[in-house]
Amino acid sequence: MSVAPAFGTIAAMATEIRDGRLSPVALAEQMLTRITKLDPVLHSFICLAPDVLEQARQAEAEIQTGRWRGPLHGIPIGIKDNYLTADMPTTAGSTAPGLAFPRLDSAAAGRLRAAGVILIGKTRTHEFAWGTTTPPTRNPWNTACIPGGSSGGSGAAVAAGLCVAAMGSDTGGSIRIPASLCGTVGLKPSFGRVSRAGIIPHSWSLDHAGPLTRSVADSAILLGVLAGHDPADPGSRDIPVPDYTALLQGGVRGLRIAVVRNHFFGRNQPAVETAVERAIGWFAAQGANVHDVTMPDLEYGLGAIFAIELASSAAYHDASLRAGRVAAFSDDVRTLVRLGRLVTGADLLKAEQLRTRLMEGFRRIFDAADVIITPTEPVTAPRTDQAEVAVAGGRESALAATWRLTYPFNLAGLPALTLPCGFDGDDLPIGLQIAARPFDEATVLRAAHAYETAHDWKDRHPPLAVEDSA
């Protein structure tokens, strides 16, 4: 049996595992060795499963006796520390006393286990999924930089080859932000596509669950397992789930692409704008029908999503607010949770009205387009001590900047994916964002797969991680 490279994909490994050429035990051992070597620097995991090798041995035994469950069987995957798991504690990134979360599997964890996944450990999250820095996790491309958040542990772990893929959650960009800043693929499915049952809530109407992966095909494989109606999640929709992997092929000739020129362009780091424009040019050269559009009200969206998130967070943490436990939250999260009490009913009404206008604006764009393409982030990864970032036209709060281009697709509940499309002068990754109408993840994945296979961005890895690769 062989041992796969540290940066192998699910799609490639699955065949080797099924055919007995790759041992799930050897693969799990390799990941554990890499975690031991690299995670004291990256801090991407908060804990490891106590039975990783036992899970791997069980997977190997099943496969050897003809009980291969599918392409995820024997694959080590991390899971964000706001997903409940039966075999590992959940902290939601908080050290506050008096918090106790159930020891049971979230819906996503259950689906992954049923598919034969080895849940290797819990990846770090910004406390209660509230921020975009995820301390103390570091970016493997430059450990002086943030990994993004709130799924920063998942982004860093996948980019560094510490697990083959990882689960994240996304309320305003928390899958796509770290995926972009760490140079991985990150998929936020449509609202209602993947169950959030058993995920510590941040904002009920904005939370999404999805994967961070090394390739678009891997995201398609994972979405095929994760998607489906779940009565335990009131937001879940009973919508047919297509074969995402089978629909990856087909290219982009004739694909109608809208480029939303206001809001998403003009206030970005120059390297980001250049890389994304180059990617847009590639789609046009392949026969896609690319056209520019503008969309009203986007400039007001950040205030709307912030009002909804603040109020939702205050509601969830109401007992902690009343008991004074929020005093033990980290400074930024404590402030935000307390601010949520100041959001009025009128504020929420205005936010929801704006949200409705944005949803209608996107609907009109999709009357003449199949996908929207934008930058994922206006900047590459900021330093851990950087409160502001430089963008065209001036400086901007790092927090506001990292949310600015991702949150519209949370407000509208649209599927959105990021994948690498270049690097800046400091060799930090740049992300390309592709979105589509509700429940059309298949078109997002097809467009992203076509771009990915024509470029070698996914084959570049952080030097820190490559030095320790097998």
Image: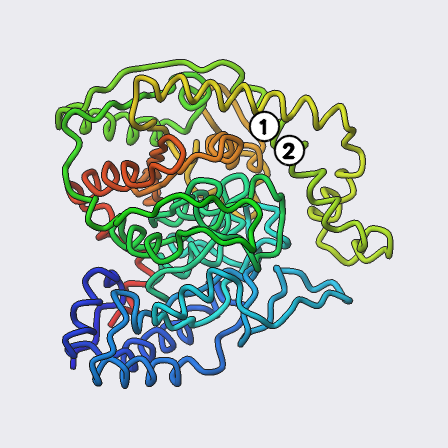
Front-lying residue, 174 or 401: 174
Is 344 situated left or right of 142 in this image?
A: right
Q: CA distance from mark 1 to mark 2?
A: 6 Å
Secondary structure state at the residue bearing disc 2: helix
Q: Could you tell me which residue is drawn at 27 percent across and 23 percent down?
A: 257
Give the residue at the far right of this rendering: 323
Quadrant of the rendered structure where residue 264 is?
top left
Is 137 situated left or right of 325 in this image?
A: left
Q: Can residue 422 be seen by looking at this rendering?
A: no
Front-lying residue, 255 or 450: 255
Is 253 situated left or right of 322 in this image?
A: left
Is the C-beta separation of discs 1 and 2 under 8 Å?
A: yes
- Quickly name the residue at label 1: 302
Disc 2 packing (10 Å; few <14; some 14–19; many ≥20): some
Colouring rule applied to residues: rainbow
Front-lying residue, 444 or 467: 444
Q: Is residue 161 above or below residue 378?
A: below
Front-lying residue, 124 or 316: 316
- Quickly name the residue at label 2: 306
Q: Amino acid at mark 2?
A: Phe
How far from the left and from the top, in percent, is residue 267? 45, 22
Q: Could you tell me which residue is drawn at 36 percent across and 33 percent down?
A: 435
Q: Could you tell me which residue is drawn at 43 percent across and 31 percent down?
A: 378
Q: Amino acid at mark 1?
A: Leu
Q: Could you tell me which residue is drawn at 59 percent across and 46 percent down?
A: 131
How far from the left and from the top, in percent, is residue 54? 39, 85
Image quadrant occupied by the C terminus: bottom left
Image quadrant occupied by the N terminus: bottom left
How far from the left and from the top, in percent, is residue 179? 40, 47
Secondary structure state at the residue bearing disc 1: helix
User: How many numbered circles does the render carry?
Assistant: 2
Q: Is residue 91 above or below residue 290?
A: below
